[in-house]
Image (spheres, rainbow, N blue to C red):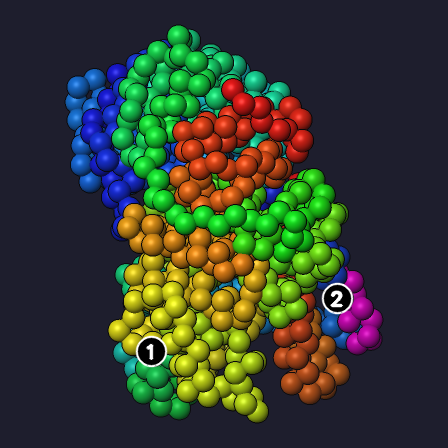
Amino acid sequence: MTLTATSLSATSRKPELTLAVIAVVGFVALAIATGGNLLSAGTLEAFFRFLAVPIVIGLSQMVVLAVGQMNLSVGALTGFCAMAAAWLMLEAGLPAPIAVLAALALGLAVGLANGILVVLTRINGFIVTLATMTIIQGLRYGVNGPDTFQGYSEGLRAFGRASILGLPAVFLVAIAVAVLVGLYFSRTVSGRKLLASGGSPFAARLSGISNDRSLITAHGLSGLLAGVAAVITVAASGSVNATIGDDLLLPSFAAPIIGGVALTGGMVSVTGTVLAAFLVRLVDVMQAQFGINPRWVDLIIGAVVLGAVLLGTVRQKLQKGST
Amino acid sequence: MLVAEKLVKTFPGVRALDGANLTLRPGSVHALLGENGAGKSTLVKLLTGVYRPDGGRILSDGAELQFGGPLDAQKAGIGVVHQERNLIPAFSVGENIVLHHLPGRAGWLDKQRMRAEARRCLELLEVDLDPDMPVSRLSVAQGQLVEIAKALSLDSKVLLLDEPTASLTGDEADRLYSVVRRLRDSGHAVVLVSHKLEEVFAVADTVTVLRDGRSVAEAEPLEGHTQSQIVDLMVGRAFASIELARHPVDASQTPALRLSDVATGLGHQDINLSVRPGEILGLYGLVGAGRSELAKAVLGLERITAGTVEIHGKPARIRNVGEALRRYRLGYVTEDRKDEGLFLEQPVTRNIAVTVWRRLAKAGFVPDRRERALAATYVERLGIRVSTPQQLAGQLSGGNQQKVSLAKWLAAECDVLIVDEPTVGIDVRTKAAFHELIAGLAAEGLALLLISSDLPETVVLADRIAVMSELRIVGELDNDHDYQRMSQQIIRLIHAEPSNPGTLRPTES
């Protein structure tokens, strides 16, 4: 994969290589430990099918981290968009393609609203998105209560179950999105401006780059990606209820942070984020295979995230020391 | 031809520029000189659209220019390399050079054009660098050249360089200046802001000197002037000094604070300083000379790698401010009172008592009554103007805030004080009152190390003056309070090339 948006920065390649090695070793070890069960067609497919959302949600967080912001509303927004799509199909009777577009548009709109709020109020993005997260959660329950939507578009659910060359279609969608995000940061003017604003807002401003526009773009893109995650959820899971997306917040941070993305902004790694999402998924499968208490999984992932942040700090210090 | 006319810029409490003029002709190198705070950087920022002027105008070939932001100035052909480094570390050389106008085709970055454009700018400077190299791998000097290439990337005819050689070695500076000469020969107007007079004389054709926000010399040819004459212009005529009551210092006393051959992790070398009780030692230097950093090293906030610190004749190993305070009665009044000196949202009483909470406390609780009593003492002693001692520190004027920031160390009964830029951002009258206060503390027997970039202040207050430049002490002078003579000597010390740093002793001229 040559998705490294930071292909310019040689130093960021090493953590990705490390992650790739850990991912391969972990996968082989788990395959052996499960007596080859992991490699059976059904298990393998499920493994990749449920990797799609973590990848996209990780990217959704990554694009705001790129400008030095955070988006706490990604999980709630994913759930909200998924619910909206299901509602449009079941209650409004709209065809699936329209519902899908509407879910994406809703994600984009809420993301843009986040960005505009951050720029207009000058309130820290952490607080703004904490507020929008709470509002969205309230809306979700308020509008629909604890109902579960199911039995919507057969075509969409068929897409969710479909496989191409043994790989689930939704996983391929996630990979395609990752490639696009990678190209966005490495090859487009807008993407480079985002990274310039994140890396050094002052220098960016002196170069005539609008940091405000970068913030709004990043939040908008983050919302759009949450919309993509919502569509994948609707297609892959077959039913949608009011709690969907609530458990996505930690994974959304885990993927980019373990993947080596700097919390201070200015540096992204799509490859790292995808690989880290893969690793988190491995831990999940391990839990399922060996019947480990799910609480331990949270503990492990939490600890790994902390460790990754610590490692990032150490790496920065070493780099500073060497120049 | 670019002309700035009667530019005025006011910041809260300070008039940074008060009628500054500048005239730039194509094909010349123009030096912009002035003491600390004379307004050089403000002028540069007005000319490059970072700030907007409050008065006056900027003309290009007779047409008035108005900048809404830095990009407008760039588009008008005015490029700048600011004192601070402004490259995006994760980006390539090429991307940094064309950052103002990243070339795109339908939104996609046109890497071919970016490389070609960057190469063209680099060739203009005759610099051989790969546009694809990340700037994080460049040396400081190479980074400087990339910034110049960036400044020229929009076909700038005017290039402003703010202290371009501050962090370069002699050889690197020479190379930079050969690039500057080449630009001049190709018809550019280059403005050079520098403290290094030797370099200025070697490369510049004309000079503008700023003093107190005004131009006291405008576009004068440098030829025919001596360095002394220029320094005279920078310093101005005799300074009207307030007469402070002076107390003779007993030279036989053991120094209250003494640094011997101190070196720090930040690069300070061979620092030797001493202050006796009742004495004020001025530590003068330009911004960035490393004075505050030295103070922080003494307090244990930075690493001391060699040498000894003695307090009242006994070796001291200070690991943090708490220890400095409680064991050695050494206090540090910070230059940044708003961020480091005060809790702006807290009442004056608490700001003063914070250093002595332990002493005031009864079973872990700090009684309000005791805090108030303590604060009242210092409010009266230092003449702090408050409506009530419960007033929030953030509501006080700058001068009174500074007094509160000082009071907490007096409350802790410190007898050695490091006072860092005590009157920065304070108006002239309050300044005089503050000077009396500091002189009064010395008369009471405190030992004071006064860090200041304000030359008149240093000459008025200090008994002796140590001069720091580039992390070394370049000389120490007995102060006779004759402003004209002292300032001449000090400026020469700073502007002299550090041929033999640390041991340089001035001679009377």
Name the one closer to the observer, A89 or B167: B167
Q: Is residue B303 above or below residue B181?
A: below
Residue B398 position within the rendered picture, expressed as x and y whole percent measured from the top left = 33, 58
Residue B161 position within the rendered picture, expressed as x and y whole percent measured from the top left = 43, 27
Residue B236, picture quadrant: top left
Residue ID at (36%, 87%): A141
Looking at the rendered structure, the kind of residue marked 2 is Phe
| CA neighbours of label 1 inside 10 A, class few (<14), some (14 to 19), many (20+) | some
Looking at the rendered structure, the kind of residue marked 1 is Gln
Q: Is residue A83 above or below residue A142?
A: above
Q: Quadrant of the N terminus of chain B?
A: top left
CA distance for labels 2 and 1: 64 Å
Name the one closer to the observer, A82 or B344: B344
Residue B152, picture quadrant: top left
The tag on residue B320 is: none
Is B290 included in the stretch rendered in magenta? Answer: no
Residue ID at (40%, 18%): B229
Q: Predominant secondary structure in magenta? A: helix
Residue A245 position within the rendered picture, expressed as x and y whole percent measured from the top left = 47, 77
Q: Which residue is mark 1?
A: B390
Q: Secondary structure at mark 1?
A: loop
Magenta residues, as a range? Answer: A24-35
Name the one closer to the observer, B343 or B88: B343
Residue B427 position within the rendered picture, expressed as x and y whole percent measured from the top left = 29, 50
Q: Secondary structure at mark 2?
A: helix
Residue ID at (56%, 39%): B466
Q: Is residue B91 above or below residue B204?
A: below
The tag on residue A27 is: 2
Residue A320 visible in this rendered orientation of the protein:
no
